[in-house]
Amino acid sequence: MRSPVPLLLPVLLIVGWEVAAYIIDNPFILPSLTTVIPILLHPFSAEYTLGTGSLMDNAAVSLFRVASGFALAAVIAIPLGIGMGRSLFLNDFLDATIELLRPIPPLAWVPLALAWFKIGFVSIVFIIFIGAFFPILLNTIDGVKSIKRTWVEVAGTLGARETQVLGKVILPGASPTIWTGLRVGFGIAWMCVVAAEWLPGITRGLGYLILYAYNFGQTNVIIAGMVVIGVIGILIDQVFKAGERRWFSWRSLDR
Amino acid sequence: MTLTIRHLTKEFPVPGKENITALSDINLKVGNKEFVSVLGPSGCGKTTLLRIIAGLDSTTFGTIELDGEIIDSPSPQMVMIFQEYSLYPWRTVRDNVTFGLEVEGMKKPQAREVALNYLHLVGLDEFAERYPYELSGGMRQRVAVARALAIEPQILLMDEPFGALDAQTRNKLQKELLEIWEQTRKTILFVTHSVDEAVYLSDRIVVLTPRPGRIRDIIVSPLPRPRDRTSPEFARIRRYVLDLIDESGKAKEGLRGQTSTL
Ligand SMILES: Nc1ncnc2c1ncn2[C@@H]1O[C@H](COP(=O)(O)OP(=O)(O)OP(=O)(O)O)[C@@H](O)[C@H]1O
Ligand SMILES: [Mg+2]
């Protein structure tokens, strides 16, 4: 049997929560779990979420936004990272600019995003793009730079052309690190979407839902929304981890 | 098929200092189906020599020719087997061997069949579906040999392929290599720092001096094949090569009576 230690703290927290909620006796500050759980048990019903779309409706909206911004980031960052990892010129040309832009938090782009793209889908996707872009780019560069020179030279002596070296050596050799970049990038993108959905004029999404619930003093809906945000984050991270084990175990096993 | 090395000199620039001369005026002709060893101590330029022949590095002076054609980039006629571990860890053993064939444009099913033949040749049929990390060092080098043979080059360039192996495995692989050489009739240029290995394997032994690598002597082996390490003849040739190395070492070290690292 597995050790029960990992479950200990969550159980204590839940018990402590219930006790505290009972003592405080103010559902706006700390609602009892008995008012949160019914919402979670009806994820497809809008009745439990103040009529602003069910938990799953809003989750789907948020996921679609994240997937769009994330895909755009991947499509641009991976080729760019490969180019920068392979070409000293491209690296020298872009590196300083990237180092300058990288520390700017994605949410600091919000005003600019609004100025450029107005309120709506494009602005949100842009914020998510910024969040996911840099981890993917930097990991791709790292992965390409970590390719062993011998791997490339073996391919050369076996007659591979430049494009074949790229497709059969550089890409597979760097893919575990690129995958890590995608995983980290998705995590950040998921964090960004919640905040981006607080932009004025947005009317759907998990971020919108919890802010809306706040305006109505429905803390139990806020907490249910937070649980869904957390669970989706974990699930997607697990999918990335499973992919890593499935496809890239060679990297940790290789000696 | 003849490989001709003419006046090959290689210098490496060292920032702020004089260039390192790794190889100095190497002249060598390697004929068809010959087994030639290049013997020399660590750092004398053996890897550098092989890399230049393989077209991976440029010369400072001199030329490499294959049947009169200058070699300045990798040629499918020659394949190098590296000193260090060089398999692709994300490919199975079999798919490592198909690499060169895929690059040539051979279809995957056919390439896999060819690969299995070469894996059979190196005695690794059963490991076709395994990954390199599941293999021992000796098995990995055998896969590297199969991968090189699969594209049917004329010349194999082998850089201390058995250098990291224990004596027993080493002897076994040497024997297997000779069998493969006899079956496939390749020309082999084999780099080693082991006198025993060079004497056991070669038709000719090219002895290099330590830094910079020059040709000290070329010994044509009179030993008949198959060779017997314990025969007096073998011991005599071995002695001769050792003396030769010792002399070149002494000449360099100013006759301090040091024994050579070999
Ligand atoms: N890229 C390089 N830049 C500078 N110096 C180099 C470079 N490659 C090799 N050298 C130098 O050239 C000399 C020969 O190196 P090389 O690797 O050819 O030796 P080797 O005979 O293969 O040694 P070993 O038996 O240890 O493999 C060494 O002094 C080394 O420091
Ligand atoms: Mg070497």
Image (cartoon, rainbow, N blue to C red):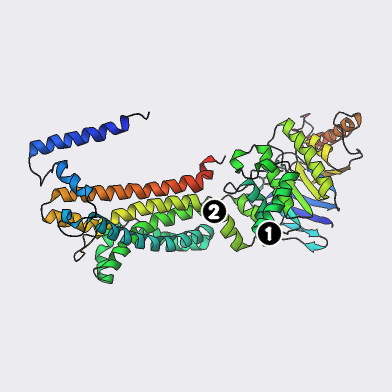
Residue A81 image position (x, y, % from top left): 47, 59
How far across and how far down the image is residue A115, in percent?
Answer: 25, 70
Instruction: Report crowding for label 1: few under 14, some 14 to 19, many 20 or more residues within 10 A (C-alpha).
Output: many
- How far apart marks 1 and 2 lie (CA) works out to 18 Å
In this view, the residue in front, A227 or A139, is: A227
Which labelled disc corresponds to residue A22?
none
In the image shown, does B199 or A123 lie closer to the viewer?
A123
Expressed as whole percent of the image width and height from the top left, the position of residue A194 reads 25, 56
Tell me whether marks 1 and 2 sit on the same chain: yes
Q: Are marks 1 and 2 in contact (CB under 8 Å)?
A: no
- Picture residue at 25% right of the left edge, 35% below the top: A10
Using a 10 Å C-alpha cutoff, classify the residue at mark 2 as few (fewer than 14 neighbours), some (14 to 19) or many (20 or more).
many
Question: In the rendered structure, which disc, 1 or 2, sits on the residue that comes first in sequence?
Answer: 1
- Amino acid on which the number 2 mark rests in the picture: Pro
Image-quadrant location for residue A211: bottom left
Local SS, label 1:
loop
Report the residue marked by disc 2. A172
- Which chain does tag 1 point to? A
Where is B40 relative to A2, above or below? below
* Subunit ID for the residue under disc 2: A
Q: Is residue B205 left or right of residue A177?
A: right
Q: Quadrant of the N terminus of chain A?
A: top left
Residue sitting at x 32%, y 49%: A233
Residue under numbered circle 1 = A159
Tell me if residue B140 can be seen: yes
Left-right relation of B72 to A174 = right
For badge 1, the amino acid type reads Gly
What residue is drawn where x is 69% and y is 46%? Answer: B144
Residue B48 visible, this angle: no
